[in-house]
Image (cartoon, rainbow, N blue to C red):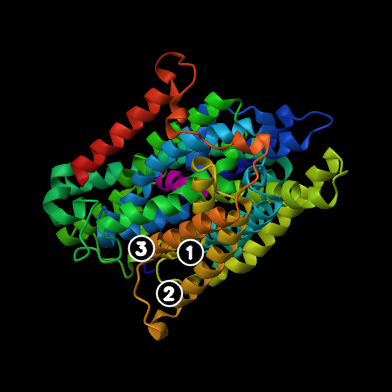
Amino acid sequence: MNGASSLSMSRLDIAVVVAYLAGIVGLGLWAWKRRRTKQASSAQYFLAGGTLRWPVIGLALFSTNISTIHLVSLAQEGYVNGLAYGNFEWMAAFLLIVLALFFAPFYIRARVATLPDFLEKRYSRASRDWLAALSIISAVFIHIGFSLYTGAVVLRGLFGIDIMTSILVTALLTGLYTVVGGLLAVVVTESVQTVVLILGSACVLGFGLSRIGGWEGLVAAVEPVKLTVLRTAAETPSLPWYAVFLGYPIIGLWYWCADQTIVQRVLGAKDERHARLGPLFAGFIKILPVFLFVLPGLIAYGLVRQGALPAPESSADVYSLLVNNILPAGLKGIVAAALLAALMSTVSGALNSIATLFTLDIYRRWRPQATEKRLTLVGRVVTFAGMAVAILWSPMISHFQSLFQGITAVICYIAPPITAVFIWGVLWKRASAAAARATLMAGSALGLVVFFLDWFKATTGWRVPPMMATFYLFLICSAVLVVVSLLRPHAHTEESEKLVWKRPGDALKGAWGPGWLDFRLVALALFLAMVGLYAVFG
């Protein structure tokens, strides 16, 4: 980073960061010790014993989702493209409604510990094994790898520490309480980290708006199109409005409804009501990132145009440029803690999910007689192994030109077959085991081919944007699933029949209450809030 964008940390800032690190690791260890019993079960380790309430679930969902990639890269996108990439945050709210209404009830009723376990109950063992492998790969290479690398880049700017050292230090601290404490330690620390994350980001936003002259000053300083989220292909070729509405639901359904790293917080819910309300609460929190993460980048763009800030050497340095120039001593430390919170929460959540997937979906199949103590031990060993692989992979991520667009592209090629299998599985009774297996295998192979076509597009001439490619892949996967299901019908068991909605409207049935916290009312309020935001900023 250049001198203008590297951060000068005072002793007070450094003290805040050190206190945060010590406090969050200590909290994680304390949380597990508090609930620990002499014969701790695998359910306690992997799913917090099914004790999670909706506020904790909602905060943990948000915290696991938000990483240093969001704080740094969304500011970069705000600087370059305005609010356009805020679609990735606001569209998530609609998919969290889908999770709450259509998927969470089945996950709780089926009493599954993992999403591959759900696929086995709905389809077959083969589907479970394929999804388990895909989920472990995505957790290591997407959730952990990208987060570790982005965090290391930020820490280099904060303290001048080289990237590999930063990766090792953050991995060690995060792995410590995750290995020992399991999901309970993860969600307790995530709840605190969410508060720190929002507070630190709010500081950047508040001081940035003050410097540029408030909202009116921002409007005067930037082009009007940069304050809109829905663009034409001519305005933003990488993300036109139709790609948002066609492509995001595909990757969003996978990420929010079928990705173990995210949904594991819902699987640990106390009951079905908490499993529904938790994602809806997270949906309301997802309104904030456009203002907390994207808007600061646009503010930096306006300040540079006014001459109030020096232009960054690279757009990737925008977040550091802002913090270094607008925040006083002490608050820089809070923002640094927020960056670490984003990194540690995402990594810890993914590590716990890897341990859960391997132990409950793979190891227990090999060793069905394994004791609870043995399962927990294996989970801890796998957590360590997953972190080691991610450490080796993360430096290679530097080959991507844009981290946020890079991670989005990878997800676009992984999601379509999984999304097809899950959405058809809960809405269409005739979706068969043979079709699910064929869809997962063919869709994954086709996604890999398209990924390489895109990776080597200078040679291949590939020009399809990832968000449109994921839509086309989903159509192909759906066609495969429907055709194979008709040719090879599914033989339902009594259990699998209960995991399909006879009619979509059945998802809205059930006892009401208590009061305004009925999930239907909360879902409606969230839906109307998001429609209103798109009406204002569209």
Q: Main secondary structure of the magenta part?
A: helix
Q: Which residue is disc 1 drawn over?
A: 413
> Are discs 1 and 2 less than 8 Å apart at CB?
yes
Please state which amino acid type lies under the numbered disc 2: Asp
Q: Which residue is disc 3 drawn over?
A: 468
Quadrant the N terminus occupies:
bottom left
**Disc assigned to residue 95:** none
Instruction: Using the numbered discs, state the Cα–Cα distance from disc 1 to disc 2 in whole angstroms.
Output: 10 Å
Instruction: Using the numbered discs, state the Cα–Cα distance from disc 3 to disc 1 in whole angstroms.
Output: 11 Å
Please state which amino acid type lies under the numbered disc 1: Tyr
Q: Nearer the viewer, residue 462 or 442?
A: 442
Percent from the top left, x then y, of residue 116?
Answer: 65, 48
Percent from the top left, x then y, of residue 489?
Answer: 60, 50
Label 2's element?
A: helix
Magenta residue check for 307: no
Please state which amino acid type lies under the numbered disc 3: Met
30 versus 251 height, above or below: above
421 versus 233 height, above or below: above
**What span is colored magenta in the figure?**
331-341
Circle nearer the N terminus (3, 2): 2
Q: Which residue is disc 2 drawn over?
A: 454
Q: Residues within 10 Å of mark 2 (few under 14, many from 20)?
A: many
Q: Is residue 511 visible?
A: yes
Q: Residue at x 32, y 59 (%)?
A: 77
Q: Residue at x 50, y 54 (%)?
A: 482
